Image (cartoon, rainbow, N blue to C red):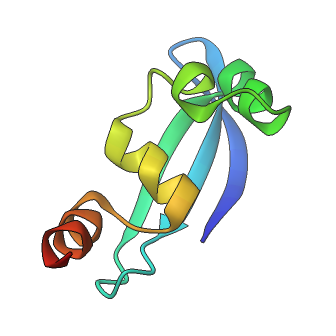
Amino acid sequence: MYERVSTTKHNGELHVEVRAICEGGCNRTFDFLVPLDDWQKWQSGALIQVALKSVHKDLRELLISGLCGSCFDNLMSEE
């Protein structure tokens, strides 16, 4: 589960502040910034790996599946 918390200026550019909570069992909360233009591209239908290429792959996975990197790895190692 994720939510767009606010829009903020970082290093002179507008960013979206995102808060995501892992639903894989650890329930950790992740707060991170995404460039506003990239966020809008993703929200408009661009593939996440293209639109949010500046965002770490584990955070992109968290946005897609609700699983943090550790919980995703644990789930995949069980199969």
Image coords of residue 23 (percent x, y):
45, 80
Q: Is residue 75 left or right of residue 46?
A: left
Quadrant position of the C terminus in the picture? bottom left
Q: How many marks?
A: 0
Q: Is residue 66 left or right of residue 15?
A: left
Image coords of residue 3 (percent x, y):
68, 62
Instruction: List the single residue furthest toward the top.
Output: 12
Q: Residue at x 62, y 23 (%)?
A: 51
Q: Is residue 57 left or right of residue 4?
A: left
Q: Residue at x 59, y 51 (%)?
A: 18
Locate residue 10: give its quadrant.
top right
Instruction: List the single residue furthest toward the left.
Output: 77
Quadrant position of the N terminus in the picture? bottom right
Q: Is residue 22 above or below residue 9?
A: below
Of residues 75 and 48, which is closer to you in this image? 75
Q: Is residue 18 above or below residue 78?
A: above
Q: Residue at x 34, y 76 (%)?
A: 28
Image coords of residue 74 (percent x, y):
17, 73
Q: Is residue 71 above or below residue 10?
A: below
Instruction: List the single residue furthest toward the front.
Output: 79
Instruction: List the single residue furthest toward the bottom.
Output: 25
Q: Is residue 73 left or right of residue 43?
A: left
Q: Residue at x 36, y 38 (%)?
A: 57
Image coords of residue 42 (percent x, y):
72, 32
